[in-house]
Image (cartoon, rainbow, N blue to C red):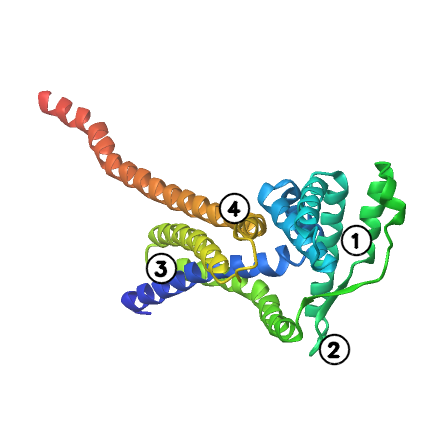
Amino acid sequence: MHPRLRSALSAGLIALACLLTPCGTLAAWGAYGLTDTGRYAAAMAPLAADPDVRDAVADTVGEGVMNEVGAGPLRSTVRLYVEDAARSFTRTEAFRAGWDAANRAVHAAVLRALRDEGAAGRPVTVDLAPVTARVRGRLLQDNVPIARRIPVRHTEVTVLPAREADRLRKGYQVLDVAAFWLPLAAVVFAVAGIALAACRRRALTATGVGTAVGGVLLALAVLLGRRLTLAELPGAVDGPAAGAVYDALTATLRTASWLLVGLGLTVAAASWLTGRYGHLLRRRRPTAGAAAEAPPSSTRARL
């Protein structure tokens, strides 16, 4: 193969590998990170102590209670009492238990709907009975007097309408395939590009730099995704609370992006330094040989 053709093909494969690396990382994060209920619940658990999240939950609960109360002469007084009670509840262990149970229930329901082909055209619903039972049990442990009066009823709440669930199901199927093939293709293309290169050291350096650039682009994509996500939220959704949830979900992805940057720069620096050191050694070897041969020549000359 002609050297120029080899170099062009090698550069194309390396560029494609560097492009697929952040895409494969994103797909793997979505397919393996977000679809694990335990990891999702662990990521959401610290948000139970986040002030923005607690305020958003308290406002939502208080608004729901006031909708049930309706209008009346003491509505303003009742609102103040309900809001204070809701905010106080978000600081208890019972709220943390309910938060964890609710997140696990919602995640499991959405995951079942995404993986079930027969669920097409049906909304995703969650039964609140396990969540209520968890909160009730925690209140009983804390000896709250009204805990025994809390009814545990099977109440179905819609988390995703049918149209949104169908759209996410199609995306999940594509993501599940991409999460396996994109990282594998990136590795294969990188190895093939380095093997075809006329100078493999330079190709390895270019691959490291490209991987680092891909990590930076992935980090920027996460940041841009946060802004776009918060900008598209309806007015009823609390922005700071949604931002805290987004940050918790993408923490692993941000870490992965900076790991790509670190790995790429390390490989590039090691390859460059190795080549530089080898070049210096090659320059010194002839000098050392000439110096070794010089004494006999000068000795014979003096003789």
The residues tagged by marks 1 and 3 sit, at their Cα atoms, a distance apart of 59 Å
Mark before the other along the chain sequence, 2 or 1: 2
Helix, strand, or loop for circle 1? helix
In the picture of the structure, the residue carrying the numbered disc 4 is 255
User: For the residue marked with disc 1, what is the amino acid?
Assistant: Val
Q: From the viewer's perspective, is 87 left or right of 147?
A: left
Mark before the other along the chain sequence, 2 or 4: 2
Q: Nearer the viewer, mark 1 or mark 3?
A: 1
The residues tagged by marks 3 and 2 sit, at their Cα atoms, a distance apart of 50 Å
Mark before the other along the chain sequence, 4 or 1: 1
Q: Residue at x 35, y 59 (%)?
A: 197
Against 302, residue 132 (above or below) is below
In the picture of the structure, the residue carrying the numbered disc 3 is 197
Quarter of the image that includes the N terminus: bottom left
Q: From the viewer's perspective, is 86 left or right of 298?
A: right
The residues tagged by marks 4 and 3 sit, at their Cα atoms, a distance apart of 31 Å
User: For the residue marked with disc 2, what is the amino acid?
Assistant: Gly
Q: Nearer the viewer, residue 89 or 34?
A: 89
Q: Nearer the viewer, mark 2 or mark 1?
A: 1
Q: Nearer the viewer, residue 272 or 297?
A: 272
User: For the residue marked with disc 4, what is the amino acid?
Assistant: Thr
Mark before the other along the chain sequence, 3 or 2: 2
Labels 4 & 1 near each other (Cβ < 8 A): no
Q: Is residue 5 visible?
A: yes
Q: Tell me if mark 1 has few (under 14), some (14-19) or many (20+) residues whose alpha carbon lies within 10 angstroms of its own.
A: many
Against 81, residue 127 (above or below) is below
Helix, strand, or loop for circle 2? helix
In the picture of the structure, the residue carrying the numbered disc 2 is 118
In the picture of the structure, the residue carrying the numbered disc 1 is 131
Mark before the other along the chain sequence, 1 or 3: 1
